[in-house]
Image: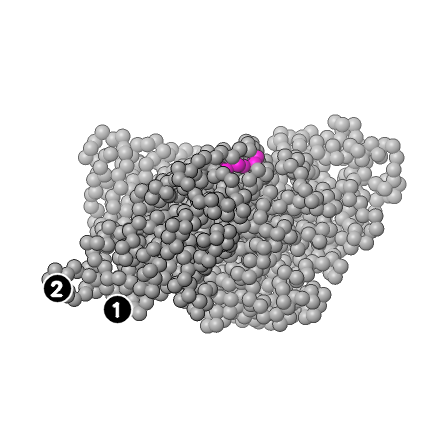
């Protein structure tokens, strides 16, 4: 215990001066820590600091050995006895507060809710206070499980900068015999004494350096180091939240949030200033990462035609329209001239008027006119339907026009009425494909009078799904033509993409297209910040950066507490729920529980009722914040937003700019913050922020040569109306001829002069469209039912392909935990609205998963085994070296990239339980499942022989090098194609296999292999699958050199030693990025690009991040097997500087012999 005479609560003139300057001393110390230069060492520490160092050493030793046992929470009371025995002195709260003062970014010392420390599941008490009285009826009224009035607060101490390095090994034979039922044969991570000793030493050194810097800073400013620390202890010692709440005179002077949410928020520049003035700000805004886009005044134009007074009055009354913006005028004039139009302007620029006015004018001239509106989400369709109905009600002659929705939710008894009476229907591609087109004869009148087809958010229709939609549109045009209507006009709106005219032409099969992209609508001043998470320790970048979710949590809470209406976009559903959970916890910790109900999460999978309620609450201003996936990226009207937080780069420049456009509607200023995750593509843009605004948009890809997709829609078209090759080839392309002749059934000719007609093959009957899924996900969904306290309410619907990842059920088996308490190995943890649920039952037959509220702070992650193998070459090309010269010498043989058929085999065998920091705390088996086999497309590159030789010579890990190189390439693909982070995948290396000491028969070729995760669908192995897969891997294959150069540059610029999430350690790696060799990846990528590699600069292995204690069995072998070469394989030429026009290069073929293929010089 510190002497009271020296306590921070004792005041004097000198102590007051010390208190005023203590923050400055700490800031000076922190700023100096940014420099890598050495700090003068204080030769003789005062007694206070010598005792504090002894206390730190004891805490460090006890904590490190204790952290190897993950089920033991690092409580202050748990540490106290052992530390006192080690340090031979009493351990006080002030001691740890002083250590945290010296190491503010390396130590966690705070009160947390006891529920957040529970490793094993504990059910919510039935009828307990954790659930509100209305919980059985409304998920939004469930009380916060962290309510500090009803739970115990525990004081926690942790070192947060680094974890122990773990090794994984198989159970020994005697352990296998003793293995309890339900347990995986994976031994839990072990931590060697050497690793623990190394970490203890590193922390002790870090404390000494921080103390020396602090004392040097105090000496330079004339302050007493001991007095500076003592003056801060009163505010640094954590106080239990219940004590704070029960204190009548609650001091809000130092709280960085206003006590009440302001009615009118301040200007954005002031908000930005607040963010940068916070104590936690460490220069997170990257260099050149703060941009301001000036406000834009509205620009208007004049129509080349007249609209009726009734229509003008209705537009004014409904939308306050007195003039049309310049882009609206250009589009309306082109539509009036009979052209097809695609509009690519900003969010809230009035695009809806562009497709509302033409159909309203058409109805004024001919009440029989009809139109089809298609939107990517039901919510967006409902918004637009209401807006159109509001205008129609104001036009006397059109107030009785029927506008209705015709989708899967439309009752069957209503469908006939809508078909016969509606002039405008709101539908989607799925309904058009499955119901409307196959019922063509019932829709003949509607199709005959069809004037306009409106497709909003056209950029959404890309990849495989876009290819399906393109053929659905051709089927629609074909049926309209059969009833004499060849003048249907197509109107589309889209986010800005690189190829709008080409994309629209491919989707609809039309050519007379006008692109409108010069936005004339007004816009407020836009502030854009590129915000990188700071390093945990600036002097040790290898420790990594702080968590992006944590950084986003702090920012989101600051914004909403200052009245800034904010939406936070997350890349995936899991991140969305984890951020929501963190926001709830942060609001509790700052004593703003009243704000919890004003923030909600929003993502795919929630029931339609819940999504509509969240949208309504946001629109009406009841919510200040939404945490969402890209489900809200599209234009659902949720009212005016002030700020957008983008947590992690959202897969493409187009996604980024569209998400940014959700804030700042009309003349209001707005803020967008891109919070950089540890992902390599994020860090690439953190270092190159200008590319976020200068880089061209990515192409949207469609593949109209996909034979499986084409045949599927030819069968559907033939069912709707018999096919004539001569007539329909204009719509479906030349590839249809062979398919029609071989796969359809020829009708008997009625006469010699009758055209040859073909109908659907019997195996597709009775309804071909129901045999063809146009989505790249399963049609089946599973209902997730909350059974907490007998509620039995469906809270989510999950696609069948996601169930093994999110709702698999564990195998209950009683066992004794280390503390002697009987526990159960139950199911996975499922997070909904930021609250954890445990899976109680999963029934594939009924497609129901039952979940129950729980209070745990761990999550689960799937364990699976995947093999990715090249099957057949469909295209090949020589890789253009960095020098630009293609050569084929003995020292530098030509490197090829291949594209073709890929077979992926996956077996799910269990899951890991992980704590809040992602550490494995348990391994659990699941019921054995049969292998899932996917036939898809992909590309691959064989590792050059010189790279293999160098890696072996330097004793580097081959599997780790290949794994790291594959991660790096995938990370850079988002700069080439518009895709999500999981569209292209690879084979990840499992530590259980790569670190094994016994020889294995499973050898993998020295090859980098990548595949389309989304393909045309499951198919027998004997059946040729889609021609290009989803098209993503084909695009990367074509621009592989660009990706490789960016990958090499990213590795070179990353400051870590062995690989981190900013370079080769993928955060979404199924094998936790354990088997990695950063330097090995560098060698492989340089060799593929035929760049010079100095062997003397390549460090000798084994790598420091891999286990050091034993020699591993080599699982990688040189490529020797022969990949089949398709008969119609495409040989892609590249420009080469060789003067010999007869240069030929060799390629392995199926027979095992070598054949020569000339590479033509461009």
Name the front one of labels 2 and 1.
2
Q: Residue at x 53, y 55 (%)?
A: 603
Question: Which residue range is magenta in the image?
Answer: 517-526
Q: Residue at x 44, y 63 (%)?
A: 408
Q: Residue at x 67, y 50 (%)?
A: 586
Horizontal and vertical percent position of residue 1143: 21, 35
- In the rendered view, tell whether residue 841 sits above or below residue 996: below
Local packing at callout 1 (Cα closer than 10 Å; few below 14, some 14-19, many 20+) is few
Checking the image for residue 751, the label placed there is: 2
- In the rendered view, tell whether residue 1143 sits above or below residue 434: above
Horizontal and vertical percent position of residue 155: 74, 53
Using the rendered view, name the quadrant where residue 1145 is placed: top left
- Report the side of 628 relative to 1084 (left or right): right
Magenta region, mostly helix, strand or loop?
A: loop
Distance between the alpha carbons at the discs numbered 2 and 1: 24 Å
Horizontal and vertical percent position of residue 993: 45, 56
- In the rendered view, tell whether residue 789 sits above or below residue 386: below
Which of 1078/710 is in front? Answer: 710
**Do the residues bearing badges 2 and 1 touch, measured as CB atoms within 8 Å?**
no
Q: Residue at x 66, y 32 (%)?
A: 31
| Quarter of the rendering occupied by the C terminus | top left
**Residue 1040 seen in this snapshot:** no
In the image, residue 485 lies in the stretch drawn in magenta: no
In the image, residue 525 lies in the stretch drawn in magenta: yes
Q: What residue is pinned by disc 1?
A: 762
SS at mark 1 in the image: helix
SS at mark 2 in the image: loop
Which of 283/735 is in front? Answer: 735
Checking the image for residue 162, the label placed there is: none
Point out the tag, 2 or 1, that comes first from the N-terminus: 2
Which of 1056/383 is in front? Answer: 383
């Amino acid at each position: 215990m510190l002497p009271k005479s020296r306590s921070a609560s004792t005041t004097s003139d000198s102590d007051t001066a010390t208190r005023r300057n203590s923050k400055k001393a700490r800031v000076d110390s922190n700023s100096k820590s940014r420099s890598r230069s050495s700090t003068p060492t204080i030769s003789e520490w005062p007694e206070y600091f010598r005792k504090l160092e002894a206390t730190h050493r004891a805490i460090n030793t006890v904590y490190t050995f204790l952290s190897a046992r993950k089920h033991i929470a690092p409580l202050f009371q748990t540490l106290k006895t052992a530390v006192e025995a080690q340090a031979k002195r009493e351990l006080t709260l002030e001691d740890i507060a002083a250590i945290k003062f010296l190491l503010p970014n390396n130590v966690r010392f705070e009160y947390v809710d006891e529920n957040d420390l529970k490793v094993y599941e504990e059910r919510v008490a039935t009828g307990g206070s954790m659930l509100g009285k209305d919980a059985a009826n409304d998920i939004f009224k469930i009380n916060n499980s962290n309510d500090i009035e009803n739970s115990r607060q525990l004081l926690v101490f942790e070192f947060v900068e680094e974890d122990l390095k773990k090794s994984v090994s198989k159970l020994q034979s005697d352990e296998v015999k003793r293995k309890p039922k339900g347990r995986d044969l994976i031994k839990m991570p072990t931590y060697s004494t050497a690793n623990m000793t190394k970490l203890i030493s590193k922390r002790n050194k870090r404390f000494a350096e921080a103390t020396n810097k602090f004392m040097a800073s105090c000496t330079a400013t004339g302050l007493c180091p001991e007095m500076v620390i003592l003056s801060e202890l009163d505010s640094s010692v954590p106080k239990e939240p219940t004590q704070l709440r029960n204190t009548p005179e609650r001091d809000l002077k130092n709280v960085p949030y206003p006590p009440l949410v302001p009615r009118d928020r301040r200007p954005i520049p002031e908000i930005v200033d607040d963010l940068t003035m916070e104590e936690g700000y460490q220069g997170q805004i990257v260099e050149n990462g703060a941009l301001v886009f000036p406000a834009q005044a509205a620009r208007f134009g004049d129509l080349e035609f007249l609209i009726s007074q009734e229509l003008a009055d209705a537009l004014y009354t409904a939308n306050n329209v007195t003039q049309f913006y310049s882009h609206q005028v250009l589009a309306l004039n082109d539509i009036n001239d009979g052209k097809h139009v695609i509009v690519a302007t900003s969010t809230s620029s009035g695009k809806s008027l562009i497709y509302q006015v033409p159909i309203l004018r058409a109805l004024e001239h001919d009440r029989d006119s009809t139109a089809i509106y298609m939107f990517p989400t039901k919510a967006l369709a409902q918004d637009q339907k209401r807006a159109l109905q509001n205008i129609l009600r104001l036009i006397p002659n059109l107030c009785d026009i029927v506008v209705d929705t015709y989708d899967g939710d439309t009752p069957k008894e209503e469908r006939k009425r809508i078909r016969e009476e509606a002039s405008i229907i709101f539908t989607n591609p799925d309904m058009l494909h499955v119901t409307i087109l196959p019922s063509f004869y019932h829709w003949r009148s509607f199709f005959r009078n069809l004037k306009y087809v409106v497709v909003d958010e056209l950029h959404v229709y890309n990849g495989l799904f876009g290819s399906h939609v393109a053929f659905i549109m051709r089927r629609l045009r074909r049926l309209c033509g059969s009833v004499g209507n060849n003048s249907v006009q197509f109107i589309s709106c889209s986010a800005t993409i690189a190829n709008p005219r080409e994309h629209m032409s491919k989707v609809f099969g039309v050519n007379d297209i006008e692109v409108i992209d010069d936005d004339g609508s007004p816009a407020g001043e836009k502030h854009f910040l590129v915000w990188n998470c700071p390093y945990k320790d600036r002097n040790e970048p290898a420790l990594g950066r702080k968590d992006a979710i944590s950084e986003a949590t702090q920012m989101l809470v600051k914004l909403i507490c200052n009245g800034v209406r904010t939406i936070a976009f997350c890349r995936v559903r899991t991140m969305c729920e984890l951020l929501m959970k963190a926001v709830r916890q942060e609001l509790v910790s700052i004593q703003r529980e009243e704000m919890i109900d004003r923030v909600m999460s929003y993502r795919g999978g929630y029931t339609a009722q819940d999504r509509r309620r969240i949208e309504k609450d946001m629109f009406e201003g009841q919510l200040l914040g939404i945490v969402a996936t890209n489900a809200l990226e599209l234009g659902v009207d949720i009212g005016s937003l002030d700020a957008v937080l983008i947590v992690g780069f959202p897969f493409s420049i187009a996604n980024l700019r569209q998400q940014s456009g959700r804030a700042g509607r009309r003349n209001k200023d707005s803020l967008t913050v891109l919070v950089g995750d540890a992902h390599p593509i994020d860090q690439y843009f953190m270092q190159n922020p200008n590319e976020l605004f200068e880089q061209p948009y990515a192409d949207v890809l469609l593949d109209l040569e996909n034979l499986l997709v084409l045949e599927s829609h030819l069968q559907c078209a033939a069912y709707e109306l018999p096919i004539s090759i001569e007539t329909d080839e204009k719509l479906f392309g030349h590839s249809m001829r062979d398919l029609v002749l071989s796969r359809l059934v020829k009708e008997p000719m009625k006469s010699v002069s009758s055209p040859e007609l073909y109908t659907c093959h019997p195996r597709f009957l009775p309804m071909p469209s129901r045999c063809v899924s146009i989505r790249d996900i399963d049609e089946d969904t599973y209902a997730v039912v909350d059974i907490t306290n007998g509620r039995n309410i469906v809270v989510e619907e999950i696609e069948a392909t996601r169930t093994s990842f999110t709702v698999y059920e564990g195998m209950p088996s009683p066992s004794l935990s280390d503390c002697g308490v009987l526990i159960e190995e139950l199911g996975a943890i499922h997070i909904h609205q930021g609250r954890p649920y445990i899976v109680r039952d999963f029934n594939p037959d009924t497609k129901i998963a039952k979940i129950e509220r729980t209070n745990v702070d761990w999550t689960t992650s799937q364990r699976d085994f995947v093999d990715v193998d090249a099957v057949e070459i469909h295209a090949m090309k020589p890789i253009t070296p960095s020098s630009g010269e293609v050569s084929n010498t003995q020292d530098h043989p030509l490197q090829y990239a291949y594209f073709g058929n890929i077979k992926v085999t996956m077996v799910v065998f269990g899951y890991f339980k992980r704590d809040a920091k992602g550490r494995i705390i348990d391994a659990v088996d699941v019921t054995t499942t049969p292998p899932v086999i996917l036939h898809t497309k992909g590309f691959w590159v064989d590792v050059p022989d010189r790279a293999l030789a160098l890696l072996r010579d330097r004793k580097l890990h081959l599997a780790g090098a290949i794994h790291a190189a594959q991660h790096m390439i995938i990370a850079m693909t988002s700069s080439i194609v518009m895709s999500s982070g999981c569209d292209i995948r690879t084979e990840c290396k499992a530590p259980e296999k790569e670190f094994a000491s016994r020889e294995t028969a499973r050898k993998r070729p020295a090859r980098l292999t990548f595949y389309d995760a989304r393909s045309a669908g499951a198919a027998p192995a004997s059946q040729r699958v889609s021609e290009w897969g989803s098209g993503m891997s084909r695009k990367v294959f074509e621009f592989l050199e660009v990706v490789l150069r960016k990958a090499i540059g990213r590795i070179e610029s990353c400051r870590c030693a062995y690989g981190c999430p900013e370079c080769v350690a993928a955060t979404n790696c199924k094998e936790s990025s354990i088997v990695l060799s950063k330097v090995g990846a560098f060698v492989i990528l340089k060799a593929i690009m035929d760049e010079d590699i100095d062997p003397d600069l390549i460090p000798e292995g084994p790598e420091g991040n891999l286990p050091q204690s034993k020699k591993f069995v080599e699982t990688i072998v040189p490529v020797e097997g022969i990949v089949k070469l398709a008969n119609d394989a495409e040989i892609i030429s590249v420009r080469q500087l060789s003067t010999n026009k007869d240069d030929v290069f060799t390629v392995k073929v199926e027979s095992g012999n070598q054949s020569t293929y000339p590479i033509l010089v461009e």
